[in-house]
């Protein structure tokens, strides 16, 4: 899924053997980062031909963040006989709105870590110390203001998986402004 594009979340409950056409649960909810986006309250899960299903359409906008999607409900235990009630967390999925291959910039804060952003400016906003590296895929980016008191590297021209930047360049349209710290720049063209 991508920022600005609709995607579906599907919650499914199956009981095809013991209670194929019965109330099997209640109080279902689909949550995104703990906030109910569908369901909630005292709503029933009633199977028909052994299955109950709800599909919720969702779209993310703004700054990309990971989302924890959860499906919860109370299991009745024995169909509508309601023995052994128990609240269950069924499924827990972390959704990253940009797959790694679509990120345009990789930040390497140290030898053991890396994270991703959509622009050099976004990656630079995460910098917390000297020696960090910001790698840009081949492509065009907007201006960057370097105003933190750190010495970093800005490298351009990387291919899709950030494995090589030999004989390739990235372009920054506009300007680069350095008001604090220092930046070593390679494989970047400024227009």
Image: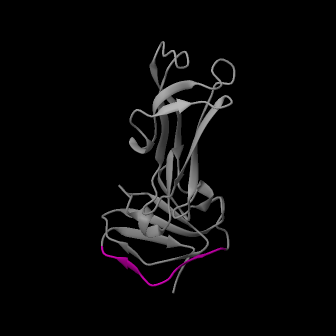
Q: Quadrant of residue 131?
A: bottom left
Front residue (pair 31, 115): 31
Q: Quadrant of residue 151?
A: bottom left
Give the x, y percent position of residue 111.
Answer: 51, 48
Give the x, y percent position of residue 75.
Answer: 50, 22
Is 143 placed above or below 122 here? below
Q: Which residues are magenta?
A: 168-179
The stretch drawn in magenta includes residue 171: yes
Residue at the image position 53 percent from the left and 31 percent from the top? 45
Residue projecting furthest to the top: 83
Give the x, y percent position of residue 163.
Answer: 65, 58
Residue at the image position 30 percent from the left and 64 percent from the top? 149
Front residue (pair 161, 166): 161
Is 96 placed above or below 191 here? above
Left or right of residue 40: residue 75: right
Give the x, y percent position of residue 77.
Answer: 52, 16
Confirm whether residue 74 shows in the render. Answer: yes
The stretch drawn in magenta includes residue 177: yes
Confirm whether residue 111 shows in the render. Answer: no
- Looking at the picture, the colour scheme in use is one colour
Is 114 placed above or below 5 here? above
Is 66 placed above or below 83 here? below
The N terminus: image quadrant: bottom right
Left or right of residue 10: residue 17: right
Q: How many marks?
A: 0
Residue at the image position 61 percent from the left and 72 percent from the top? 138
Residue at the image position 48 percent from the left and 16 percent from the top? 82
């Amino acid at each position: 899924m991508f920022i600005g594009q609709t995607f579906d979340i599907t919650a499914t409950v199956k009981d095809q053997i013991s209670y194929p056409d019965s109330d099997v649960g209640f109080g279902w909810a689909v949550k995104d980062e703990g906030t109910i986006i569908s369901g909630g309250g005292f709503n029933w899960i009633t199977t028909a031909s052994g299955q109950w299903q709800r599909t919720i359409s969702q779209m993310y906008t703004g700054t990309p963040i990971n989302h924890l999607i959860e499906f919860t409900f109370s299991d009745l235990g024995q169909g509508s006989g309601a023995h052994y009630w128990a609240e269950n967390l069924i499924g827990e999925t972390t959704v990253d709105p940009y797959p790694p291959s679509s990120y345009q910039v990789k930040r390497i804060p140290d030898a053991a870590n890396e994270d991703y952003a959509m622009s050099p400016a976004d990656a630079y906003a995460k910098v917390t110390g000297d020696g960090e590296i910001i790698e840009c895929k081949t492509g065009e980016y907007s201006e960057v203001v370097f105003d933190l008191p750190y010495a970093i590297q800005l490298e351009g021209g990387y291919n899709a998986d950030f494995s090589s930047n030999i004989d390739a360049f990235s372009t920054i349209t506009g300007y680069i402004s350095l008001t604090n710290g220092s930046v070593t720049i390679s494989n970047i063209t400024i227009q």
